[in-house]
């Protein structure tokens, strides 16, 4: 299971946890797993189309990736608001 | 005491005061978040707010008081796995029998029967949206106006920029267009007569005459005397018939207030002079109401939902906010105006409760 790290309001929605062990073979599967374990997260990272929201960035081991990226059990996955979203 | 709920680019602001002098900011919620709309539900007394986080998407929230704990509403989403995502919730309107309606982008209508805690998408209207060529306006494909009828819970009118007016008599099971008489100047003269690429900016219904409605259009002000079936242009006499907001005096079905902007090419108050225009004869004549408003070097933009009201008749209170962060009010139906607040973030919406 990969280590998923969430920040800001996502932390409260994830039951107050900043780091969660989630199973899944890709970033998208991890995010779906996060929604399954913490339904309050639903709609905050992935939209109705199943797409990571435009101003959310996902990093695997420090590298920005897209949601199709494969993830290993030892990986660290960070979900962060992007600087592009601020005005 | 009057309470104003201001949706701004940087949070929800609650202002309180008497309708003759500056108001105090008594609460602020969602600091830093764009708040598109906020209202106090007359049924439940709750405050309901809509936000569009650039990061986390559009949400509806509710609370007993704006300074208290906010809860995210459920069901505010489009069907999963489709081609569309919800972009924004533009407005929430109380309906008959405790219902609440929410309109948003991309041209969607939601209904709540529990005071805003849970919402359900109106699927028949959504099917129109998906199967037809609905074009967005500059603000997106926004369903921004919702008009219920008192005592007729199955009847509803909605307006979409830019997909025109839609009417239902069976509680949203079927919808028909209500655009006859609207003449868009931004389409070619030989555009189809039945085009529904119509950029309505705001629509309201007269409380004392259920058949009487008004529209501020993208170039044009219109009146309907048949519950939205057909429309008559009434913009003559205005310095410009382009604008966004619209307000009515609930006591007078012949009344309407608009805030003209120079035009779609220059969306500011004409000649740096801020004036509200009032009709009391259903649009036959218009009277400028600017006593107390900036008369020079004031180039304001007032957005479609940034014009609110409370009360009626001679005591009608009117409030509008601009993208400059200035808010103005009148406690005497527009006869005189005062500065409610200034130096706020850009104002997206204004609602008032007296």
Image (spheres, rainbow, N blue to C red):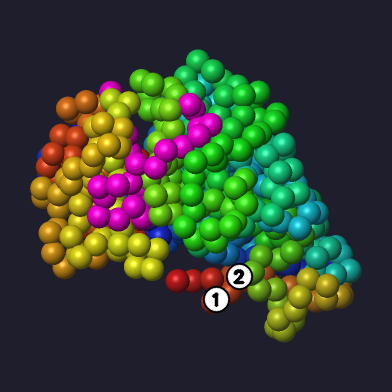
- Quadrant in the rendering for residue B122: top right
Residue A34: in sight, yes or no? no
Considering every residue shown, the one lying at the far front of the view is B190
Q: Which residues are magenta?
A: B226-251
Q: Is residue B301 left or right of residue B190?
A: left
Residue depicted at 71% across the width and 44% down the height: B128
Please give the chain letter of the residue carrying mark 2: A
- Asked if residue B177 lies left or right of residue B173, the reply is left
Mark 2–mark 1 contact, CB under 8 Å? yes
Counting residues from the N terminus, which is met first, the one under dot 2 or under dot 1?
2
**Relative image position of residue B168 (x, y in whole percent):** 62, 29
Let me know if marks 2 and 1 both belong to one chain.
Answer: yes
Q: Quadrant of the C terminus of chain B?
A: top left
Query: In the rendered image of this protein, does residue A74 appear above or below residue B313?
Result: below
Q: Main secondary structure of the magenta part?
A: loop
The answer to whether residue A40 is above or below residue A25 is above
Q: x%, y% of residue A4?
A: 73, 67
Kindly identify the residue that appears in the image at 70 percent across and 29 percent down.
Answer: B173
Q: Residues within 10 Å of mark 1 (few under 14, many from 20)?
A: few
Q: Which residue is mark 2?
A: A55
Task: Tell me what residue is drawn at x 72 percent, y 50 percent.
Answer: B132
Secondary structure type for disc 2: loop
In the visual, does B48 lie left or right of B287? Answer: right
Is residue A24 within the magenta segment? no
Spot occupied by residue B302 in the image (x, y as percentages of width and height)? 33, 55
């Amino acid at each position: 299971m990969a280590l998923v790290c969430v920040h800001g309001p996502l932390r409260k929605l994830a039951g107050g946890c900043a780091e969660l062990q989630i199973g899944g073979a890709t970033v998208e599967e991890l995010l779906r797993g996060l929604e399954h374990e913490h339904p309050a997260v639903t709609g905050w990272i992935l939209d109705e189309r199943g797409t990571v929201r435009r101003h959310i960035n996902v990093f695997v081991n420090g590298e920005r990736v897209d949601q199709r990226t494969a993830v290993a059990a030892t990986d660290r996955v960070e979900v962060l608001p992007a600087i592009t979203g601020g005005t | 005491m009057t309470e104003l709920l201001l949706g701004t680019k940087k949070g929800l602001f609650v202002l309180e005061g008497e309708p003759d002098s500056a108001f105090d900011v008594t609460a602020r919620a969602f600091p830093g978040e764009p708040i598109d709309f906020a209202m106090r539900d007359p049924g439940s007394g709750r405050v309901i707010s809509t936000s569009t986080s650039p990061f986390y998407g559009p949400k509806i929230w509710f609370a007993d008081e704006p300074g208290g704990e906010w809860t995210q509403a459920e069901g505010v989403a489009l069907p999963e796995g489709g081609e569309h995502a919800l972009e924004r919730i533009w407005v929430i309107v109380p309906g008959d029998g405790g219902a609440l309606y929410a309109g948003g982008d991309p041209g969607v209508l939601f209904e709540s029967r529990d005071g805003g805690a849970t919402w359900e998408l109106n699927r028949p209207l959504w099917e129109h949206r998906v199967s037809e060529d609905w074009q967005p306006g500059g603000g997106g494909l926004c369903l921004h106006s919702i008009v219920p009828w008192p005592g007729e819970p199955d009847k509803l009118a909605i307006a979409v920029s830019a997909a025109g007016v839609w009417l239902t008599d069976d509680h949203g099971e079927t919808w028909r267009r209500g655009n006859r008489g609207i003449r868009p100047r931004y389409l070619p003269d030989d555009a189809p007569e039945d085009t529904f690429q119509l950029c309505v900016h705001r629509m309201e219904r007269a409380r004392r005459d259920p058949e009487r409605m008004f529209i501020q259009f993208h170039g044009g002000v219109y009146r309907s005397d048949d519950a939205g079936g057909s429309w008559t242009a009434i913009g003559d006499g205005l310095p410009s018939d382009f604008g966004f907001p619209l307000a009515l005096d609930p006591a007078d079905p012949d009344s309407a207030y608009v805030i003209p902007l120079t035009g779609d090419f220059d969306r500011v108050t004409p000649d740096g002079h801020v004036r509200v225009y009032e009709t009391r004869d259903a649009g036959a004549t218009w009277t400028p109401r600017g006593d107390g408003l900036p008369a020079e070097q004031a180039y304001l933009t007032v957005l479609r939902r940034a014009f609110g009201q409370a009360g009626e008749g001679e005591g009608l209170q009117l409030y509008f906010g601009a993208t400059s962060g200035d808010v103005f009010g009148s406690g005497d139906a527009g006869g005189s105006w005062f500065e409610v607040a200034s130096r706020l973030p850009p104002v997206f919406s204004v609602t008032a409760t007296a």
